[in-house]
Image (tube, rainbow, N blue to C red):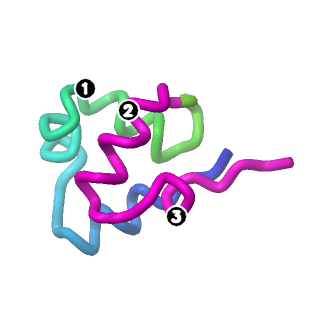
């Protein structure tokens, strides 16, 4: 799985820590999400997308 979290976060001029605080996780979770090393729950994916003013489909690219 690839993510575009870093790209969308940069557009909003947010740090990893700020995004983590906004969605209620640790900064390390955002690091792992951005690297594609962590599959988020549906709720976390929704919260991240909502915070970054986008959709889950725009943020996460799932490999077939």
Between discs 3 and 2, the one toward the N terminus: 2
Q: Residue 45, located in which quarter of the rendered image?
A: top left
- Determine which residue is flagged by label 3: 58
Against 50, residue 47 (above or below) is above
Q: How far apart are marks 2 and 1 (CA)?
A: 9 Å
What residue is disc 2 on? 44
Judge from the rendering whether residue 60 lies leftward or rightward of residue 47; answer left or right. right
Residue at 21% x, 45% y is 19
Q: What is the count of numbered marks?
A: 3
Residue at 24 percent across and 46 percent down: it is 16
Q: How crowded is mark 1: few (under 14 residues within 10 Å), some or many (20 or more)?
A: few
Q: Residue lying furthest bottom in this view?
A: 11
Write the start and end of the magenta stretch as one range.
Answer: 40-64
Which one is in front in this view, the residue at disc 1 or the one at disc 3?
Answer: 3
First-in-chain label (1 vs 3)? 1
Q: Where is residue 28 in the image (x, y as percent from the top left)?
A: 33, 29
- Magenta includes 51? yes
- The answer to whether 21 appears left or right of 32 in the picture is left
Left or right relative to 38: residue 26:
left
Task: Tell me if residue 3 comes above or below residue 20 in the rendering.
Answer: below
Task: Give the CA distance from mark 3 to mark 2.
Answer: 15 Å
Q: Residue 25 carries which label?
A: 1
């Amino acid at each position: 799985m690839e993510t575009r979290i870093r790209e969308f976060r940069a557009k909003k001029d947010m740090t990893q820590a700020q995004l983590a605080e906004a969605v209620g996780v640790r900064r390390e979770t955002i690091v792992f999400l951005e690297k594609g090393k962590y599959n988020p729950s549906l709720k976390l994916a929704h919260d991240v997308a909502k915070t970054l003013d986008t959709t889950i489909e725009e943020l996460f690219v799932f490999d077939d």
